Amino acid sequence: MTEQTDVVIVGAGGGGAVLGLALAKKGIRALVLEQASGPPGGLRGEILQPNGQQILNRLGVLSRLPAEAIKPVQLFHFCRAGGTRLCTVDYAMLPPPYNRAIVTLPNVAHHIILQALESHAPRSLRYGVRFKGLLRDGRRVVGVAAECRGKPLTISAKLVVGADGAFSKVREALAIPAQLHRYREGYLIAMLDDTDGLDEGRYFVGRRTILGLFPATGRKTYLFYMIPAGTMERVKDGGLLALREQWCTIDPSLEKTFHGLTDWSQTAYMPAARVKTATWVADGAALIGDAAHAMNPHASQGRMQAMADAMSLAEIVPTCLERGDWSAAALAQFERSRRPQVTMLQRLADEQVLFWNSGNPLLAYLRDRVFKTLDRNQRLRYRVLAATAGLRDTPPFSLLDRLMAVGLLPDPRADRMPPDASAQAG
């Protein structure tokens, strides 16, 4: 079977689905290929940061998120394991209307995006299709070879987009050099019944200890807990009682909620990896999301950045279509616009891995000092929040800011909002 389209997108994850919808709303022909047999299931809660909310609003789907499946959260408390509060971050500091995070039930936002895509462009989303290779005309990519239900499928396209994750087959076929780093820690995630009345986010740090707790709608609590990479089976061997006791030691106030963990089916494992690539574009092809730049979950921006990639790439596709120019040089505008924020977030996340995941007493001491400084320093607290919210492209701290954050220098502007706050509000 042979088909023809303008853009073929390999992968219907956070980036691929958004790109397909953005192009459909522009009237551009696109096919989104997904190897899974249907929409994603399983246990994966999600926090929609303000930049992600803005994107969903631009696509007209933010208002479609069912009220019974989302929970707006403004306050996030960072605490030392055991309960001592270090810092509170209030999303109300950000310009409205995106001055909150939104915690969703598993896959809710993704399903709404997929439904909107199928509504705007029927039959443009194909499940059960496996990417097999690229079609080329000389050096230029001109389509993909795939397999659908055991039968070969050839799709000619002006642009091929790899949105197929950190272990991207499209990136491999393009022979784009990539550095794949697997972190030493992964995360056990769980969705529990909230029997303790959690209304605000909590994030506990200790010596090689991280426990995040976020209120979700329907009296649920979304939880993630750092464990050594690849040790989920070992954790299970230790038993539910041992795991619940570990959590109770970290946050005794949620003992009743933790005792709601009664079966391993309430949990899942999320690995963590970082991808850095030499380029995101080639003649007739581009990479978005984790295929181009997977980052540690500490950034709280992985899916948001895939969505931002999709929107940025969708903006230049009409010009490429009009000019008939799908060269790497023409597509490089997309990469130039996106790399600064992605690079900043990857570095910020790795700094957080170094200090937050640490078992080193000195690093843990410095980490706690920074949290305490942020609690008193409105200027620095806003900058960190703006980075987490996806509202800035530059690092939140300069060298002088770092010295102030660890308490080595006073900050005469600690009580002032930074100048960039007004620009973000505009």
Image (spheres, rainbow, N blue to C red):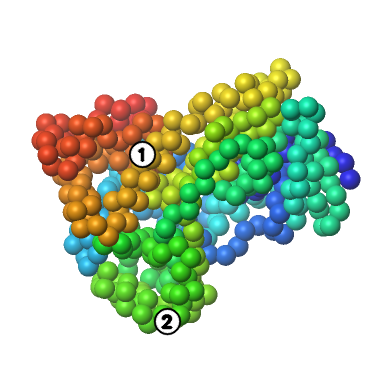
Give the crowd class for mark 2: few <14, some 14-19, many >=20 residues within 10 Å.
Answer: few
Which of these two is toward me, 111 or 175? 175
Residue 63 location (% of width, % of height): 52, 46
Q: Secondary structure at mark 2?
A: loop
Q: Earlier in the sequence, mark 2 or mark 1?
A: 2
Residue 157 location (% of width, % of height): 77, 33
Residue 25 in sight here: no
Residue where numbered disc 1 is placed: 387
Residue 118 in sight here: yes
Q: Is residue 247 above or below residue 97?
A: below
Q: Are marks 2 and 1 in contact (CB under 8 Å)?
A: no
Identify the residue at image location x=38%, y=46%: 349
Quadrant of the rendered image containing residue 220:
bottom left
Which of these two is toward me, 402 or 113? 402
Left or right, residue 315 beside residue 422: right
Which disc is residue 109 wearing? Answer: none
Q: Quadrant of the N terminus?
A: top right
Residue 18 location (% of width, % of height): 60, 42
Q: Is residue 128 above or below residue 24?
A: below
